[in-house]
Image (cartoon, rainbow, N blue to C red):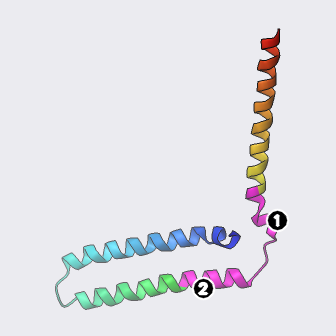
Amino acid sequence: MDFVRFLHGPLLGTLGGLILLFVLAHIVLRVVDEDMKPVIYKGRNWLTVFLLAMLAWFAFTAATVNEVPRNVIDRSVVNERADVLEQQGKDAKEAAKKDAEEKR
């Protein structure tokens, strides 16, 4: 799951790039004449393959090179849990304070 979380940014970037590529190709295809359409299709297809190949290359190199310790990757989870515990402590103090005021 950590690897998928690590790839979240590149996946979103690739998906956004593909959407942008197809939208731009569609717009350009409406403007150009019939002679240029095969060139646009070929360029769109090659850029799609390039984007997917770059994502695959990034995922492969990220999976094979382990330079980042696991504790650095999991730091966000630890920080999130610490924030939850801190908030629960504040809530408990406030509840105790309200309970003490009600007993007076």
The part of the chain drawn in magenta is 54-77
Q: Secondary structure at mark 2?
A: helix
Count of numbered circles on the image:
2
Q: Say which label, 1 or 2, has the lower sequence index.
A: 2
Q: Which residue is located at x 75 percent, y 82 percent?
A: 65
Query: Height in image: 38 above or below 58?
Result: below
On the image, the x and y values in percent for residue 67 come to 79, 77
Residue 75 in the image: above or below residue 22: above
Label 1 sits on residue: 71
* Res. 57 mark: 2
Q: Is residue 96 left or right of residue 64?
A: right
Which secondary structure type mostly characterizes the magenta part of the structure?
A: helix
Query: Mark 1 belongs to which amino acid?
Result: Asn
Farthest residue, direction top = 104
For residue 44: magenta?
Answer: no
Q: Quadrant of residue 41?
A: bottom left
Q: Residue 17: which numbered mark, if any?
A: none
Residue positioned 54% across, 72% down in the render: 11
Comparing 11 with 39, the one in front is 11
Query: In the rendered structure, does residue 55 fall within the stretch colored magenta?
Result: yes
Q: Residue at x 23, y 87 (%)?
A: 37
Q: Residue furthest front?
A: 103
Q: Position of residue 83 (x, y in %)?
A: 75, 45
